[in-house]
Image: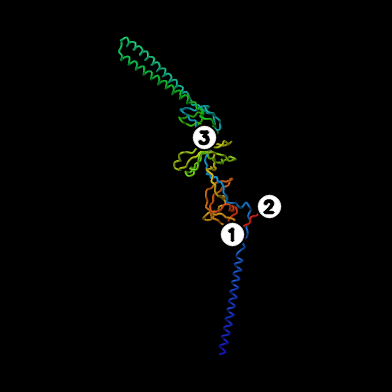
Amino acid sequence: MKRWIKWTVIALVLGLVAAGAMRALSARKAQQDALAAQVGKPAQATVELLPGDLVQVRMVELAQSLALSGPVKAVNSAFVKARVPGELKGLVVREGDFVKTGDVIARIDATEYQARVKQAQQQAESARAQVDIAKRSSDNNRSLVDKGFISKTALDASMSTLAAAEANYRAALAGVDVAGKSLDDTVLRAPISGQIAQRLAQSGERIGVDARIVEIVDLSRLELEASLNAADSLQVQTGQTAQLSVEGASKALTARVVRINPSAVAGSRAVLVYLALEPSPGLRQGLFAQGSLQTGVTRTLAIPLTSVRTDKPDPYVQLVDKGQVIRQSVTLGVRGELDGRAMVAVQGVAEGATVLVGSVGSLRSGTPVKVTTVTQ
């Protein structure tokens, strides 16, 4: 009986020792895990910001604009063409030369046309002689009818002959005018004042009717021909202004909408808009210009476009509130310009809220921030 009690006591002691050891090991492991978790979680550092790293959401008048581009063209330009065929003579103007309205550009060999004028004049003289003969015959027949020597029918026949001769004479005079017009057309004159842009023929060539000789461009009035899609064209009205940059020009040019084509271009459905350019030295036809056309002003809450983050499915901004960064989803509205910066209307943030600019980079929500002032 005593032996059994002895072994029972030993078992109890061993059990208590084992339980104590297990509790000690469990507590030690929990302590190690907590220490490891504390070591693995670094302390969150405070990010220092400059005043220039922050912008405020504010109510502004946002200028809405449309991007446009196109070639620069002269309002007045013309091709000098040959009105009659022949050998080209006297073409001395070249690209860049100035001409005035009515200046002689070149001539067509007029030998053949002078001969045609003489021929037409001789035919007119012959027709006039026939009129004189028919008139004398008619006068004689009238006297004979009055005296009863011939019948009234003979007088009518002579009067008809006179009318036919007079008609032939008038036709011959018209032929003289036609031949004279052809002779005048051998002299090629400038229809407008401007500069020679292209010389398309050479003296001594035999050219046909409507052959292009030179192109004249008037650079005193230039305009931009811009192509807009149908939706954007609905916002455009005459009188609106645009700021354009032209390749090669050192400064921006101001342009004004003067005309809008009433028809869309077949196929592309684009609408052509014409903007008058301010005179500027060195501006030439054919240069390419691009810029923005102001179409209206909208009063709305807006921030710089670069402050909007798009690395997530929905656009968002980084707000600074109570010294911490907060990510806030926003709804974007119309875009425009303010003081030369691209701005965008936003919904989802309050007026006066502070937003990080795009150059700061993406920060984790809850990151503490502090604004520092640079002193000199």
Q: Which residue is mark 1?
A: 366
Q: Quadrant of residue 326?
A: bottom right
Viewed as shown, does residue 229 lie left or right of 157?
Answer: right
Label 2 neighbourhood size at 10 Å, few (<14), some (14-19), many (20+)?
A: few
Tell me the residue at 48%/44% (across/down).
231
Q: Is residue 246 above or below residue 161?
A: below
Check the picture and name the quadrant holding the N terminus: bottom right
Secondary element at image label 3: strand
Q: Earlier in the sequence, mark 3 or mark 2?
A: 3
Label 1 neighbourhood size at 10 Å, few (<14), some (14-19), many (20+)?
A: some
Secondary element at image label 2: loop
Nearer-the-camera pick, 301 or 40: 301
Nearer-the-camera pick, 354 or 307: 354
Q: Amino acid at mark 3?
A: Val
Q: In whole angstroms, how far apart are the C-alphas of marks 1 and 3?
A: 61 Å
Residue 75 is labelled as 3
Q: Is residue 2 above or below residue 139?
A: below
Q: Earlier in the sequence, mark 1 or mark 3?
A: 3
Q: Earlier in the sequence, mark 1 or mark 2?
A: 1
Q: Amino acid at mark 2?
A: Thr
Q: Amino acid at mark 1?
A: Gly
Nearer-the-camera pick, 89 or 174: 174
Q: Which residue is mark 2?
A: 375
Tell me the residue at 35%/16% (across/down).
159
**Mark toward the viewer: 1 or 3:** 1
Indicate the position of residue 338 as horizontal and vertical percent values.
57, 46
Indicate the position of residue 214 as horizontal and vertical percent values.
51, 31
